[in-house]
Amino acid sequence: MRLPQTRAARVQLALLLLLVVAVAWGVGRALHKREATAAAARSAAQSLQEAPVYRLAPADVIAVTSVELVQAVPVSGSLKALQTAAVKARAAGELRGLSKREGDPVRAGEELARIDPTEAQARVRQAEQQAASAEAQVAIAQRTQRNNEALVTQGFISPTALDTSSANLAAAQANHRAALAALDIARKGLADTVLRSPLDGQVSARLAQNGERVALDARVLEVVDLSAFEIEAAVSPGDAAPLAVGQSARLRIEGLPAPVDAVISRINPSVQAGSRSVLVYLTVKAAPGMRQGLFAQGTVAVGKTTATAVPQSAVRNDQPQPYVQVLRDGVVEHVALRDAVSGLRGDEPMRAVPLPAGTPVLAASAGALRAGTRVQAPDAR
């Protein structure tokens, strides 16, 4: 009976040993995994402590250059025709004969429409009859005056009677002159029933229709002369200080393929109350495709200067002061720009920088990088 007990003890011992081995293997595996996790964490922490190195493309780096900058003041505004006119009804009545529409050409003095002239014609006839009647009274008074002068000479009437006839003649002549003045007024009223264009140009708006009864001074048509334009530009007082009449400007007008030239013709002597801006007026020569109301923007050249500069696009404004990102020994540095001069190199906006020529600066395509960031320049190995 002792042999089976021995075998059972051996089986139990073997199972116990297997259990111990399994536990030891599990503990060892857990410790190994923990060690691997800790090593990975240490590696990640170390990599986070090390600053990343950004690789730049050739287009991301530009060099500061010494250039001649054309100092310019920006201007913008809408085109306005120098000559515009509103054709108004100078008499009340029914509108007739209006055939012009938007875009139709008109000539100065051309008849554009009429107001029903029936009443005006009747007033003219009435005034003509009154003038004729007054003229007849003058003729009667003149004959009476001549007769009385002869009778006074012969002693048949007193000088007082002659004075009376002289006064009657003067009154008749005054009435005649008043009748003629009334006739002129009536004729002018008849002429006012005809609407004529005050200038050469094109119809820009038609505000009434045939058969419509219009009131006195009602707007019927608007006419614009497209032979010359001007722009009213609002400029800050600081920018307006160097501006003067006669200075030239270069403008781009929406819809036109090429820029156009303009000249400052007037400068308002007062500052606008609300915006605190100065109104500057620029005369623009007409060009094909120009229309009233088109938006124009450009610059007025006010002087030249030589400076080390970069394109305006390289200047960043995401901090309280504008700055440029300079590349020195593979590290990005921020250089603030205080009261830097702006200007144009051809049509490209430039900004003067306090850096020597040849200094590498990050272009706008590089994006914003923190100061101290390490980068690899395009030519670095």
Image (cartoon, rainbow, N blue to C red):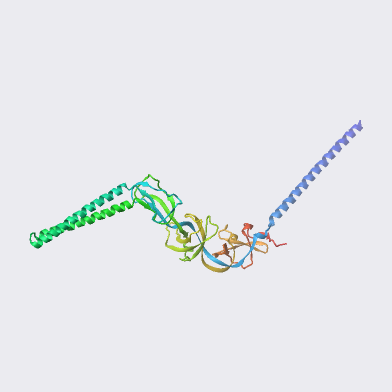
Q: Nearer the viewer, residue 224 or 195?
A: 195
Is residue 34 shown left or right of residue 248? right
- Measured as percent of width and height from the top left, residue 348 is found at 58, 62
Residue 378 position, x and y percent, is 69, 61
Q: Tell me the residue at 83%/42% (across/down).
A: 21
Relative to 327, 164 lies left or right: left
The total of numbered circles placed on residues is 0
Closest to the observer, 268 or 160: 160
| For residue 336, above or below residue 208 | below
* Residue 230 at least partly seen: no
The image quadrant where one finds the C terminus is: bottom right
Expressed as whole percent of the image width and height from the top left, the position of residue 246 reads 47, 66
User: For the view shown, which residue lies furthest in the bottom direction?
Assistant: 306
Q: Quadrant of the N terminus?
A: top right
On the image, the x and y values in percent for residue 270 come to 41, 62
**Nearer the observer, 239 or 204:** 204
Quarter assignment of residue 154: bottom left
Q: At 70% from the left edge and 53% from the top edge, which residue is drawn?
A: 45
Outermost residue on the top side: it is 1
Q: Horizontal placement of 112 versus 311: left or right?
A: left
| Residue closest to the far left | 155
Q: Residue at x 18, y 56 (%)?
A: 139
Q: Which residue corresponds to the image point at 92% horizontal and 32% vertical from the top-left?
A: 3
Q: Is residue 44 left or right of residue 93?
A: right
Q: Quick check: can you spot residue 295?
A: yes
